[in-house]
């Protein structure tokens, strides 16, 4: 994964690199301009000097032309000064010459040549003496680049601290809101700049979010009251009707189904309301639930789904497994898993095994594809086969409930036969 850099670090590095690049560019430009101008000035001066020396020789052949600064030679039919023979073939102009002196040291000089009226004039200027000045200039420029880079780094440190201080303060205030559990206006604490504009936008978002949470809380309260009341009436009415002595066995069985359905609806409402509250405040703990007992109740409530299908359902109890969660939460999760196993199994067996800190629901239905195992927990995704009825919300609710209480839920195909295995791991150390 690509490493994440803080904004302050990126600002400091960008500012330092900008200062270094700008000063280095200025240093290179200075060296280039110096070399270019120096070369042009020396060439023009030497050419002018050699032209004057040749003209003076033509006018006064016996007058010497050498000076303290340059060495000059004039060659004519009348007078030949000692000079290297290789120079005599050079054309008029300024030439860069390189040679090694008697001590083996390299030398660089410029040679100006002038040919006129059978006379050839040479003026040599040793520019090796300029190397020292050039080295000193390079040393000065390197020091200037380092100095300006350090100065840019210092300015970047100061500027990043000053610029990002309001942002850090804004983040601190937001963290304090999370600790206190209530939001206060942010905009009054910041200047009328970009950070202040961000704080104002956050205040507006916080206002909308608070209103939405309040409406959600009121809705949950209304739903809790409005739905529980008729379900309680249904439950009490069926209980009274079951006590009637003139009921037939068929009617008594139907009343039991109504009672089980109302109980499941009540548990589902309690689980959804608890999920809604707990996702805002954290899960409610303290109630210990026996997994095997809840699984037995769910199996009995789901037996009417078998109808006339040749399917056996059994509960296998191994180790005693208890969870720190309300029974309604576990009942909703197991109702979905066991109900799906019964619905999609046309014949064979549905086994519910409770052991080793987990519960597994194993069926002999058509099974699932390995690549579809995780997708089934997505909202709106339905399984194939057995009519594929439902809105595809059951397993999504099961996943949310399990995540809330730190359980792991999964579905995988069987490897020994057709069918699928749905599993909830309560103790992650028992994997």
Image (spheres, rainbow, N blue to C red):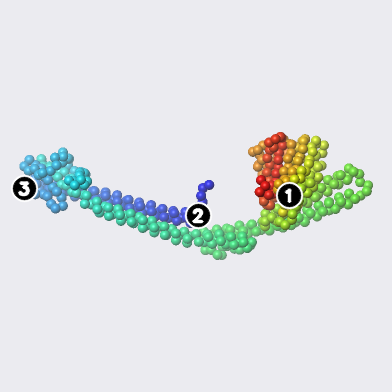
Can you name the residue that lies furthest to the bottom here?
188
Q: Nearer the viewer, residue 58 or 99?
A: 99
Which percent across, then down, holds residue 387? Answer: 74, 37
Residue 285 placement: quadrant: bottom right
- Look at the image and tell me in which quarter the C terminus lies: top right
| Disc 3/disc 2 C-alpha distance (Å) | 81 Å
- Residue at (64%, 61%) from the top-left corner? 181
Say if mark 2 contacts mark 1, CB within 8 Å.
no
Q: Nearer the viewer, residue 402 or 186?
A: 402
Label 1: which secondary element = loop
- Residue at (74%, 57%) from the top-left corner? 221
Mark 3 surroundings: few (<14), some (14-19) or many (≥20) residues within 10 A? few
N-term-proximal mark, 3 vs 1: 3
Q: Nearer the viewer, residue 254 or 29?
A: 254
Label 3: which secondary element = loop
Of circles 3 and 1, the one toward us is 1
Which percent across, then down, holds residue 237? Answer: 86, 52
Q: Which mark is residue 62?
A: 3
Of circles 3 and 2, the one toward us is 2
Residue 257 placement: quadrant: top right
Q: Which mark is residue 6?
A: 2
- Residue at (51%, 47%) from the top-left corner? 2
Q: Which residue is mark 1?
A: 321
Q: Is residue 367 visible?
A: no
Mark 1 surroundings: few (<14), some (14-19) or many (≥20) residues within 10 A? some
N-term-proximal mark, 3 vs 2: 2
Of circles 2 and 1, the one toward us is 1
């Amino acid at each position: 994964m690509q490493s994440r850099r803080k904004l302050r670090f990126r600002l400091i590095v960008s500012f330092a690199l900008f200062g270094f690049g700008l000063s280095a560019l200025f240093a290179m430009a200075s060296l280039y301009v110096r070399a270019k101008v120096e070369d042009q000035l020396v060439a023009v001066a030497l050419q002018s000097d050699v032209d004057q020396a040749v003209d003076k020789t033509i006018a006064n052949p016996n007058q010497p032309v050498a000076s303290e600064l340059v060495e000059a030679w004039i060659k004519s039919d009348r007078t030949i000064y000692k000079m290297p023979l290789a120079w005599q073939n050079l054309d008029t102009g300024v030439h860069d010459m390189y040679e090694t002196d008697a001590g083996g040291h390299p030398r660089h000089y410029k040679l100006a040549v002038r040919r006129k009226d059978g006379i050839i004039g040479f003026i040599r200027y040793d520019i090796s003496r300029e190397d020292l000045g050039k080295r000193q200039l390079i040393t000065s420029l390197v020091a200037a680049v380092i100095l300006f880079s350090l100065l840019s780094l210092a300015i970047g440190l100061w500027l990043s601290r000053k610029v990002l201080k309001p942002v850090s303060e804004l983040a601190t205030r937001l963290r304090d809101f999370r600790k206190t559990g209530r939001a206060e206006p942010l905009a009054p604490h910041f200047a009328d700049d970009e950070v202040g504009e961000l704080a104002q936008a956050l205040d507006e978002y916080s206002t909308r979010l608070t209103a939405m949470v309040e409406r959600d809380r009121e809705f949950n309260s209304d739903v809790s009251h409005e739905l529980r009341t008729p379900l309680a009436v249904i439950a009490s009415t069926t209980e009274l009707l079951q006590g009637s002595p003139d009921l037939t066995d068929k009617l008594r069985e139907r009343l039991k189904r109504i009672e089980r359905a109302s109980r499941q609806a009540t548990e589902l409402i309690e689980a959804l309301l608890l999920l809604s509250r707990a996702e805002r405040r954290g899960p409610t703990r303290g109630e210990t639930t026996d997994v095997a007992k809840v699984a037995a109740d769910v199996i009995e409530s789901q037996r009417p789904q078998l109808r006339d299908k040749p399917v056996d359902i059994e509960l296998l109890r191994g180790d005693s497994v208890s969870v720190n969660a309300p029974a309604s939460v576990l009942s909703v999760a197991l109702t979905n898993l066991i109900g799906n196993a019964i619905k999609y199994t046309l014949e064979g067996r549905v086994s519910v095994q409770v052991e080793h800190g987990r519960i597994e629901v194993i069926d002999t239905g058509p099974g699932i594809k390995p690549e579809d195992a995780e997708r089934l927990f997505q909202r709106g995704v339905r399984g194939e086969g057995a009519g594929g009825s439902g809105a595809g919300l059951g397993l999504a609710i099961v996943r949310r409930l399990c995540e809330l209480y730190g359980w792991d839920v999964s579905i995988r195909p069987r490897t020994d036969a057709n069918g699928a295995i749905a599993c909830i791991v309560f103790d992650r150390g028992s994997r």
